[in-house]
Amino acid sequence: MPGKTSTPRITKFTNCRLVCGLNLVEQDLWIDSLTGKILKDQEAFYGLHLSPDEIIDLGGRIIAPGMIDVQLNGAHGFDFSVPCETKEKYDEGLRMVNRGLARTGVTSYLPTLVSSTPEVYWKVLPSLGPTAGTHAPQDGAESLGAHAEGPFISPGRNGIHKPEVLRAAETFDDLVYCYGADNMGSASPIKMITAAPEVGNMMAHIPEIAKRNIIYAIGHSDSTYEQAIAATHKGARMITHLFNAMRPFYHRNPGIFGLLGQSERRRPFYGVIADGIHLHPTSIKIAYNAHPDGLILVTDAMRLCGLPDGVYEWTNGERIVKTGARLTLEGSDKIAGSSATLIECVNNFRRWSGASTAAAINAVTAAPARLLGLEGVKGSLQSGADADLIVLGESEDPFTGPTLTVEQVWKLGAKIHDTAKAATVGV
Amino acid sequence: MQRVQCWEIQGVAANSYANPNTDVIMRVIIREDPREVSVYIADYIISRIKAFNPTPEQPFVLGVPTGSSPELIYKILVQRHRAGEISFRNVVTFNMDEYVGLPRDHPESYHSFMYKHFFSHVDIPPQNINILDGTATDLVAECASFEARIARYGGIELFLGGVGPDGHIAFNEPGSSLSSRTRVKTLAYDTILANSRFFGGDTDKVPRMAMTVGIQTIMDSREVVIVATGAHKAFAVQKGLEDGVNHMWTLSALQLHQHPLVVCDRDATLELKVKTVRYFESIEQAGTDARTQGPALVYRPRTYVPAPLPTKTSKPQQPTPDGTPEKVPKDLRINTELQRRALEEEELTPDSMSSRLVDSAIGGIDGALKSDLIFDRMGTRVTTL
């Protein structure tokens, strides 16, 4: 029988449904643990005479690409924006987050930094760069590069970012100084910068940012519709957490949200926090109906994700109250990020929007991969893509209806998490 | 459950198999619908493989087709495999045909069909699979190598095939030589039209040529099983079963085969005479269910003339006592009388049949192939290259 060898090279998943475009299709999937890629199975079979070493019958469950979170501030008590005494200690915390995150089905992400002082960026950014090439399956989730959310944002739309650290970049050098010259070079650890185009001279810096292969995202901004359009002309491709921390939609000036309705420019991608707290379900539905292909679900989760309820210290000496998934700044009603997991967001979004299961999954796989220029590498089940996979079970929750749960996680062709196995070990 | 019953019956039937001397028996099995037909054939193939008890050294060699009728058969075989009833680990397959010029991973290639419907779902090792390479630079050599590979396995044990509405088996279109072997074939316009539905309705996208096993290749297999379902096959079935052997209805060649089996659904018998249908039904009712006849195949067809092997094989081509594969029949009950008859037949078969045909596509290549196949010295010539 197959599967005799201790480390099976070729694994075939059978009796499963694959996310393929907007549909789920019944098809086998072959992965190669040696290359960590999804196999072009027919060619491997005929051309290389490879046959599976292990066949896994998934009993009709769904295989989706591993999820990608483009906005995640921390987890398990670790905050990317808080440097540790030594880089080693910080990296250790990061590894812990990576392993924990992978168990939730997020196999790659952009570690996100809230507005901080330049010293913080200089210290932590070198640890947060993409790890492709050196990443091992057991390392868990993989960084695709850092997301610098701030500090060049609008003081009036700061959310819970500390106002004292906010800046305005008059010259591009101001920006380079803030993030650190080494971090703005050719192999930058930064993948995305969220900034307000109307603050300082940011509008002029957008092309410079884009030139460095960094995605410029409009966010925490008081932009008018016209300013937002101008930013897309300069190269803006993304809106950070749509609706939150921006000028609200107004019928005489639709603001940043207006970008989803126009057809003069290519509509940007937009992040949506579908945790049930940040946004009304209908708002999400309006955005989705306006521009379905651009929707990217993000958690905006922070370090309290996975910790018990209570009052916790926040980055800049302030305190955060955690009540369930709801996080607020102490003494105010300001929402301080979220502690929802990405799969919960997928479930919420699927339920609220009526989107198909595949479409909801695309919002955390194919869409972010497209934004990040990683089509066919991440967020895809095509042959040649990285074998980052999640096996999803479907259950009927009495309160919330059909619910997807992450039951297995595979990273680069190796299984790194299995709820079934975890349960048996527990017993 | 059902299968177990079959085996019980077989024990009885094998004894009561009255007339072993009738080596040419056209067996026709009629079932109500395509599903029943497919179940019958799947059962049949499974029982054949099991009776053969294949090993890695002595694999079961199965000829396989593509098409809509076989699709259901594969589905059932896959189900049976998943249920643990049958393993294809020691089965070697030879596909009947493949389009010329279509890349292996084209969704309409027969490589893709076989992979999608059968190979990827069962435990057959990829190296046991033989499909003609439609992208080979030297198509004639590819055909010769295909025949050589069949020969190396000692011939095909069971050839499963479909039949076209014009009576073609494999891509042996009307007018094909009945003594043809694997070769390149120009598709009949009918076939191009029929197959255009798989190419977005665009006849220009349908390949103009295919490689296919010949009628003789099929005839040389120990057993041939043909599936014919649907009213559109009724005329072909009628021509193939009731009329004489004719190269315009290549199915009819099976009338001369030693062990043919045609499984039809009710619709495919629409053009047959009531008399014919009753006759075959009565045979089945008399207890000669094809499935239960057991491994009564004492007859071994003419051994293949070993065609030249491709140069890549490292085996010495010079016939040495050690190197020559033993042509020991898998079934040791050799009927010498039958062998003599086979020789007589060979003499009676006009060798020049293919060259006399107007069909230029076969004529030329077939002729070339034939000479290759006949001259044993080809093997030695290859090694000197």
Image (cartoon, coloured by chain):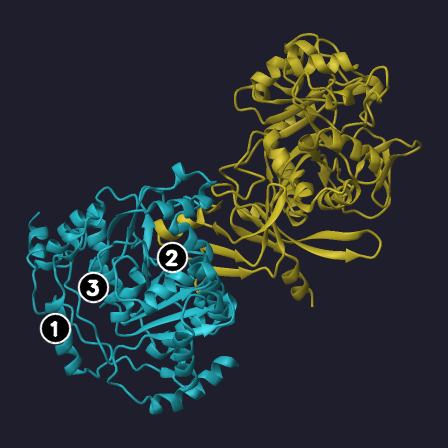
Chain colours: A yellow, B cyan
Residue at x-position 56% and y-position 38%: A378
Residue placed farthest to the right in the image?
A: A331
B111 with respect to B71 (left or right): left
Question: Would you call the spot at circle 2 few (<14 residues within 10 Å), some (14-19), or many (20 or more)?
Answer: many
The residue nearer to you, when weighing B162 against B276, is B276
Label 3 packing within 10 angstroms: few (<14), some (14-19), many (20+): some
Dot 2 corresponds to which residue? B164
* Residue A328 percent across, percent down from the top left: 87, 35
In the picture, the disc for residue B343 is 1
- Name the chain under label 2: B
Quarter occupied by the N terminus of chain A = bottom left
Task: Using the rendered image of the protein, determine whether residue B81 is visible from the camera's viewpoint.
Answer: no
Tag on residue B151?
A: 3
Q: Is residue B60 above or below residue B104?
A: below
Q: Out of B248 and B383, give the one closest to the viewer.
A: B248
Q: Which mark is residue B88?
A: none
Residue B49 appears in the figure: yes
> In this orientation, which residue lies closer to the viewer: A21 or A10?
A21
Among the 4 quarters of the image, the one containing residue A115: top right
Report whether B79 appears left or right of B134.
right
Q: Which amino acid does label 1 sit on?
A: Leu
Question: Toward which corner of the image does residue A312 lie, by quadrant?
Answer: top right
* Amino acid found under the numbered disc labelled 2: Gly
Question: How far apart are the alpha carbons under marks 2 and 1?
Answer: 31 Å
Amino acid type, callout 3: Ala
- Foreground mark, 1 or 3, reads 1
Q: Is mark 1 on a helix, strand or loop?
A: helix
Which of the pair B315/A186 is nearer the observer? Answer: B315
Q: Distance between the residues labelled 2 and 3?
A: 27 Å
- Numbered disc 3: what chain? B
In the displayed structure image, the side of residue B246 where residue A390 appears, left or right: right
